[in-house]
Structure formats: C-alpha cells, structure tokens
Amino acid sequence: MNDYDSIDFTPLVALSDDEVVTHSFVRDVPLSGGRTLALVTLDNGRDHTRPNTLGPTTLLELRDVLDTLRDRASRGEIHGVAVTGKPFILAAGADLSQVDRIPDRETAALLPKLGHDVLGRLGDLGVPSFVFVNGLALGGGLEIALNADYRTLDLSAPAIALPEVFLGLIPGWGGAYLLPNLIGIENALKVVIENPLKNNRMLKPADVLDLGIADVGFSPATFLEESIRWADGVISGSTVVKRPNAPGRIERAVKWDAAVGIARKQVASRLGRVQKSPYVALDLLKAAKSGTKAEGFAREDDALTDLIAGDQFRASVYAFNLVQKRAKRPAGAPDPKIARKISKVGVIGAGLMATQFALLFVRRLQVPVVITDLDKARVDTGVATIRGEIDTLRSKGRISSDEATRLSALVTGTTDRADFADAGWVIEAVFEELSVKQEVFADIEKYVGPETILATNTSSLSVERIGERLEHPERLVGFHFFNPVAVMPLIEVVSAPATDEVTLSTAMVTAKALKKNAVITRDTPGFVVNRVLAKVLGEAMRAVDTGTSFADVDAAMAPLGLPMAPSALLDLVGLKVGAHVLDTHHAAFPDRFYRSDNLHRLAEHGSLLERDKSGKVTGFDKGALKIVSGGGTPTPPPEILRRLEDGLADEIHRMLEDDVVHAAEDIDLCMILGAGWPFQMGGVTPYLDRVGASERVFGGTFHSPRIAGVN
C-alpha cells in the first residue's frame, strides 16, 4: 500500500463527466525462455487528430490495470510490463479541459496525487517496466516513461517535451524529481526550464537519446518488434543498459546547486520575478539532488497544488485556449472559399523587412517571388540576401539541397514594375510615411492585373488613407507583420472601409498558408498591439519626463509581466520609431496618449542603453540620462502602475466599444502572439480584471471572474 491508496479521487471524476477516456488495452507477448511481457496500449479510440490524454477516469483505469499486472507478476505469470500508445502517439499529457472547474484547493490537490499514485506504480510492479515511446509524448505523457525502469524511442517521434512551465505549472507527476536523477541537473534544466521558455521548444528524437531520457531508439517501421526484442534482452540479462548522464556524487556535491543558481539568474534576467512556475520548478529541481522518491513526489504534490489553485494557471489555461482554438477560427473571417489563388508574389522594397517577407512567402507558398527597389544595386543586394538565407537554412539541415535550389530559383529581382503584372499578391515594405506608401501603390496599380491583392505592412498609418489614390481601394488590405518576421506568429489583418470580402478572405487564407495566426482588426491608429504598447510607452515617458528614473519606471511596471521593460522595448523598436508611434497616437487621441519631447531628443541622441562589446546591456547611456534629468517631481511607483492599468482598461474598453476587434479575447490573442505577453498573465484583459482596473474605470469586467483568474 502506498501513501495515496486511501485517497478518494471521485471528486475529480465528477468534474470530468465528458472526458474522452484513453483506455488501457492489455495483451500478452511471448518472450524467449518461456517468459511473457504484458503490453499495455493506451488508446482513446479516436484518430490521430485527437491524441491520448490522461484524465481522471483514464488514470483510474490504468491504475486498475497496473494493479492486476502486479498481482500477475507476483504469481510468476508475467516477467515484464510495457506501456505504449496508439499509432504515433503515447500521450499528450494531463487532460486540462475541465481544470477551471476545480472549486477549491482541496480538490486541486487531488490532481498531482492521482498522477503520482498511478504512474508511480510503474516502478513497483515486481518486474521490469518499460515504456515504448512510439510518438508524441508531452507533459504527463513523458512522465509515464520517466516512471518506468526503461524506455525505448521511435526515431520518428514528432514532439517530446515537458512544457508545464510554459503553461504556468511544473512537471508534477514525477518529472521534477525523476528527470534530474536520470540525466543530470544541467540536462534537466534544459528540458524543464530552458525549452519551455523558448516558445515551448520540443525535443527531437536525437536530443532525447543524447540526453539519456530514452535508453535506445528504433526506426518506425520495426519499432514495436525491436522494442519487444530489446526488452526481452533486458529481462533475460543479455542486454546491459548504461546511463552515462546519470548524476554522481561530484555532480550532486559541486555542480548541482551552482547550475540551478545560474539558471535562476538567467530566468530573472529574462522574465523578471512575476511568473511563478519557473521559480517553483527551479526549487524542485534543486531539492531533487537528495532525498527519496516519495519525498520528491510529496514536494511536487504541494507545488502543483499551489499552482493549480492560483491565478496564473487559470490565466494560462485561458491563454492556451485562445492560441489553440480562437486563433484557428478567427472572428469575422469571410468564407475561405472566395479567396483568390496566389501564384506569384511581388514585394516592393529590398531592405531588411522586404527580404524577410520574400523569404517567408517563397518558403511557405512555393511560388515565384519578385522584389523591386529604386535601383539595380539595391535589388541585387536584396536577392543575394534572400538566397543567402535560403543557403543558411540548407546548411542547418532545415531544408534539403534540392529544395534550396528550387526556392532560390523562384526568387528574382527587377527595377521594371511591369514584371509585377501577373502577381496575384503585392506587399510593400517601404518607409513608414503616408505619402510614400500612397505613391508606391498608385504607381504599382498601373502595372498589376485587375484581381491583384495589394497589401500594406504599415504598423500605424491609416490603410484607408494609404489607398486614397487607388482606382480600386477595395483590393487594399493591411497585413501587419511583427519583427522578426520568421519568428513572430501574429499578423494583424486590417480591414479598411473599402476592403471587400474577397480581399479580406485572400488575406486570411494567405496568412494561414504562411503558418501565421491572423486577427482581423478595424482600420484605426495602431490597430491592436501598437495601440496597447503606445499606452505603455506613453505612461513610461510621462513618468520619466516628470523626474522618475528609467530604472524606477521599469520596476514600477514589472507587475504586468511584460517580456521586457519599457526601456528595453524602446531600445528594441528604436527611439525614432517609438517617438513616431507616440506622435501618431497623440495626434489621433490627444487627450489619452502622451507625447514626449524628451523621447525625440533621445532619438536624436541615438541611444538609451549602454552595452558591452558582446552586446550585453550594462546600464543606461549617460547622455540619455542627462537628457531626461530635468523633471523635478518623481512619480511614486504605485501611482505609475495604477495610472497605466487604468489607462489600459480605458483604452481597451474604448477599442471594444468601437469594434476595433470582435472581443476582448482578440486583443489578448494579439498581445500574446504579437507582443509576447506571457501565457501566465493570460493576456492583458484578465490581468486588468484581476487587479481591479476594469471595475475602477468602467464599473465592470472584461470577463467572468473564473476566466479572469479570480479564486
């Protein structure tokens, strides 16, 4: 009897009455020497589009199966137990679909304990236990494998990871204790902390083997047969398993705490202190260097319970659902069937953004892409840049040599805009000035066909005004990328008053083909992301101009959990761009957006942050600090934060009343995908509800209390 046997888990089952149950099917497999392996296959009976998940009913069924197998092992009927999954999928982890229905901390505590109770039995069967990782294994799915004695791996497995920290949780079914004791602390930090915080990076099969998470890998064609044969060798004693990455005494005594300490500083430098789960995970990994498995599981129980019952996890679930569901069904999108087919793309410009556009379009659409600029030298440089990036992809193994050759051949340059005549899609990447964009589109319209879609990448200018000189403004749409183009997943698709349904549909279908998430926004200053960020930067500069130091302003705004402080954001976008953004919004809404003369002076000065030779920020530029040193009445940090929160609540409420987007969820989706707003904050609107800004400003909330993350 283990410590969990007396616990009643039925309250979890009652909350999951619509669970898609993943069943545990058992069959006996004969081995050499008259021995028998009991093979458990996890299968929810759905096709590969619905992966196995581990809900309460699923886990309790697996517990009963493992208990039966332990009894059979004690009678000598079986000599090993193996667990695998349905084709291509082991399990995608815990079923979190109903977790927001958990009413209290006591019920929340049942979830980690149930996982430990069930999966922990894999190490207590009385015979060797194996997990044949035959495909997708995420979170609790990978923890099934970690709880077993041995692991084999399908070398075609598409995604293996412990993504919990990304979702505001920790690996709480054994992962935080078992993994570092299997592969060492530095490797475990990579899997548990580093990868989730790098946009939830997955492990490739080669990584899994190199790290020592799996003992051996086999090709997909013969994976199950080879795994059974290998397990037979382990059971018979003819196969010896070596684990060179398992930590020894020296690592535990010398390297362990130091590695965790370094990781803690890196997390603090990158994320600040607002997000809880990375630090909880670091504490658990540090404690895993000593003590028993039962003690490690108990620590995970307490830590996971606190997180499940807290605000940040509820916010994470909300954000996760936005990205997984709403982003795939964009609000207000026209019928995709009316979209025009794009067989050639034209890019106006040959600079940094233009070459990024061209590379993305040629790689994702696999159609000819032609770029143009003012002179041949610029065009030639742009084409060379694109082909150089294609060659880099080839050298890194991201594309084959044949594909690199084909893509390079699809990219051409010209100074003759008549070469755009047969382009179905033309996008500009020219200077952010209204007259320049108007002139570019008025000229290009003379050359393109009647069905060509024209797209502007403007970040703040009116799409309607950009199209004022067009004969057919209905073909113009805003298509606002975020930098870097290849990495950032959001495109704001801006519908101007004249934009027709065919144009809008084509833009949405094109965004999907580019593997981007698109949100439709009305043609209004700053659209969504830049309008919200303009509020942040404006309030930051207001405080600086009155005498508050940049460092104090950064600290005051830290509770928002933004991926970077206002000073770092200004440094990233550029001081001139930042000044332009504030000017644009102040001109549109002078009573609500701040304009800073000091920011223009800083732009003329040219720098805000000091950096060393390696590019690491070492502090603030002394000249910049002198420019903003005139203010004499510093603003207290609580006042800075409250003023920003109330300003954001007011502005977002106005945006929704003006139908800039269809719902608060769309604003949150934009901020998560376009500005890196942390999952654990759930987007900006749940945060504003939680801190009371919504109630203070307009006497209501953007969401129900449960969605907002209020306990």
Image (spheres, grey):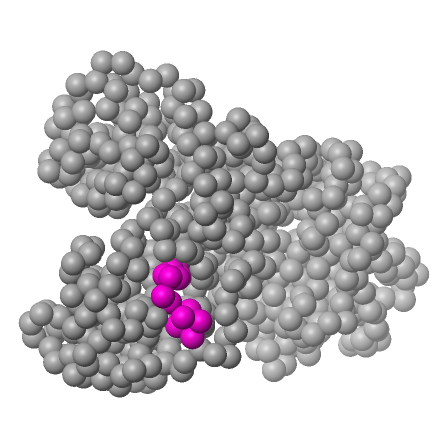
Query: In the rendered view, does 270 fall on the left or right side of 181?
Result: left
Residue 340: give x, y in percent of width and height. 41, 80
> Depth check: 402 or 214 in front?
402
> Depth check: 617 or 360 in front?
360
Where does the N terminus fall, quadrant-wise?
top right
Q: Which residues are magenta?
A: 486-504
Looking at the image, can residue 259 be seen? no
Q: For the view shown, which residue lies furthest in the top direction?
A: 632
Query: In the rendered view, does 132 fall on the left or right side of 107?
Result: left
For residue 348, which quarter of the picture? bottom left
Question: Number of marks in the image?
Answer: 0
Query: In the rendered view, does 297 fall on the left or right side of 467?
Result: right
Residue 680: give x, y in percent of width and height. 53, 41
Residue 266: give x, y in percent of width and height. 39, 38
Looking at the image, can residue 40 be seen? yes
x 42%, y 75%: residue: 502
> Depth check: 14 or 332 in front?
332
Figure check: 457 above or below 610: below
Figure check: 549 above or below 562: above
x 18%, y 30%: residue: 598
